[in-house]
Amino acid sequence: MPKFLRKAEIAITRPIRRNPPQGFVARSAFWLGLSVGVLILLRLLHLWRGDGNDALTLLLSMPLSVFLFILFWRWIFRKVLWRVRNRLIVTYLLMGLAPVTLFVTLAAIAAYLFCGQFATFAANSELNREEMHLSSENSAFGFHISRVVAMNPRILTLELPELEEAAMGESVPGSLQTSAFVDGHRIAITSSRISMESAQYVPAWSTDSTHGRSFHGLVADGGKLYIRAVDTYVAAGHPVTLVSSIPVTDRLVEQMASQLGRINIMQLSSLSDDDNDDSGKPHEPLGKRDRRDIESVAGGVLPKPVHFYDRTVYFSSPLPLTDWKTGHHHTEGMLLSVQSRPTVLYQRLFANSVLVATFVRDALITIAVFFGLLELFALVMAIGLSRTITQSISDLYVATKAIDAGDFDHRIVVKRRDQLAALSTSFNTMAQSLEHLLEQQREKERLQTELAIAQEVQNSLLPQGQIRLPMLEVHGVSKPARSVSGDYYDFLLTGPGQLFLALGDISGKGISAALLMASLHSAVRAYRFGDSGPGNLLADGEPNLLASPSLMLERLNRHLYTSTQPEKYATLFLAHYDGASKALTYSTGGQLPPLVLCANGDVKRLDCGGSVVGLLDGMHYEQATVHLGAGDILIIYSDGVTEPENEFGDFGEDRLLDLVRRNRTQTLESISGTVMQSLRAWIGEQEQPDDITLVLARQL
């Protein structure tokens, strides 16, 4: 959407302190709703009324309804169904109430169909009762008329005084209509209770062999409805036909519906014109005049409901109709409609057995209440079970939020013994373990901080930068295997052209080796001066212990032996360089012999000395002197330089010499870098096995 619409949304929602709509659906619903609201406001203010406003409002309301439904559905899932408890309850309702609803619906439909079918059955039974009443009347009339006709076949008038009593039993007094025919001729019947206005003739179809010698049913004659019965008898060889009729009027229907409700008999809008009569001949449909003239009849009153569920039952069924004139039989000529109530039908169904009716009613009510309580119990149990599940999930959610906020002391209260309780217990265990891990992490960080400080302190103990004398340049490098190193090297300027060199390797690695290295460093520096001896006096008369590396090793051996544990010791190389004579006086205490790579390619090993320092008391160390020529390179190294291994074996002394030899024209720092790079490549991805220390000195 354009930017100006976004600005308008912000301007509209800001005064009501609401966020502007986000997304296509929300924004579309916002503008459609605003447009519909404006149209309704214009209509209320009489500014724009009429079909145009209504049509536009309807046109905009249709997509607005769709977008609102989508937003409502999203709100249901984001707010209502976000909680697992609500999801489970909805699931239980769908799983439990859906079948119950289906069952109740089907039961209600079946009950309604049963009630409707029973109502129409009761109404049809009333019609059938009237038909059987007419047939019985014809039987009574026929016996008397046959006897009279047998005595006088040409009789024209017949008085039936004994029928006065019989006629009193009819449904509607004065509605019985009877006609008699002898040899097809109508004879007059005198009776105060019988009318002869119904059948003026006997159609041939009613007495032929196809329909038999009797007929009863609903007929249409002259645009009126009758319940009519036709019976034929033979008296002295003369056929006697009796036709009895009862007009279907509102009064008759009123009597039929007295204990049923309301009955309505009407003509269908269309009648089938392809029905066949009993003879198999095609029938003609009722004429337009007949369909137009047959009026509906109705009677009865729908009783008031007894209970709130005593609803109106409306049902219909077709009634067969016969055209009196033509004999055409229409199976759906008329429609019988009944309106009743379940209580009325129930009373009629069990009219002759009150106790059974009461028992059936109470039993049905009891069963309904029982299943209702059972369903309610199942729903309550389902909600209770879902509560136990969702409560555990809620506790886990709160616990995770607390852990995320840094509250590692938070614990879930476990009260049950199920899998969810075991999950909560596992979470508590995990939280406790996490707390311990964090404590260990903090302790590790503290130790790493202390190690970093120790490393800085240790680095400050080592010589800083490169030392260069007029006749000698010296460079040293050390790379610890861990944070701190057990290797040690030192350069001491003791006077003009005078330099003291030291390189040591403490047994082991890590903190203990670093501490012993610091002790050795301080001891070397403290033992710069010692007892006087021959040749160990400085120019000012003070003893010069640094001029005798062997004597210093003896003093250091005594110091380490008495101040450290028995298994602790060190290897140490000490040397004193005199620039005036280019002489290097040295002594080794268990250290790998340093190498002198001469300018002509020869190699000298400086292996004069003794055993390791600090392991045995009373050790004696020898010393020797070597003169350095121009271009000679002194190589002092710890075992971390030559002992690293890979699949090809040790790095070795020869490889070290070869590297220095091939790069001897470069600076000492560059040579050290080349050696270190080769060592890293030789070790590869493995952990560095030992501290690496390398000191190079070149005679100028």
Image (cartoon, rainbow, N blue to C red):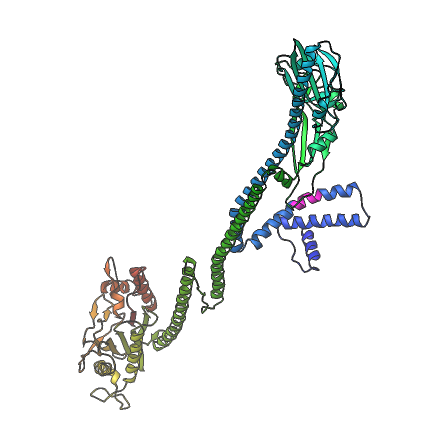
Residue pictured at 71% horizontal, 19% vertical:
286
Say left or right for 285 vs 662: right
Say left or right for 540 vs 333: left
Q: Is residue 647 above or below residue 542?
A: above
- Residue 662 visible? The answer is yes
Q: Quadrant of the C terminus?
A: bottom left
- Where is residue 379 drawn, in percent x and y? 52, 52
Which residue is the extreme one toward the bottom? Answer: 541
Say left or right for 297 vs 452: right
Residue 633 found in image quarter: bottom left
Residue 439 found in image quarter: bottom left
The secondary structure making up most of the magenta span is: helix
What span is in magenta?
59-65
How many marks overall? Answer: 0
| Front residue of this view, candidates 526 and 438 | 438
Residue 162 found in image quarter: top right
- Residue 497 visible? The answer is no
| Front residue of this view, candidates 337 and 190 | 190
Q: Is residue 536 above or below residue 679?
A: below
Q: Is residue 390 above or below residue 337?
A: below
Say left or right for 383 vs 583: right
Which residue is the extreme one toward the right? Answer: 46
- Where is residue 371 drawn, in percent x and y? 52, 48
Q: Is residue 122 magenta?
A: no
- Where is residue 417 drawn, in percent x and y? 41, 60
| Front residue of this view, candidates 477 and 646 | 646
- Where is residue 550 drawn, in percent x and y? 21, 81
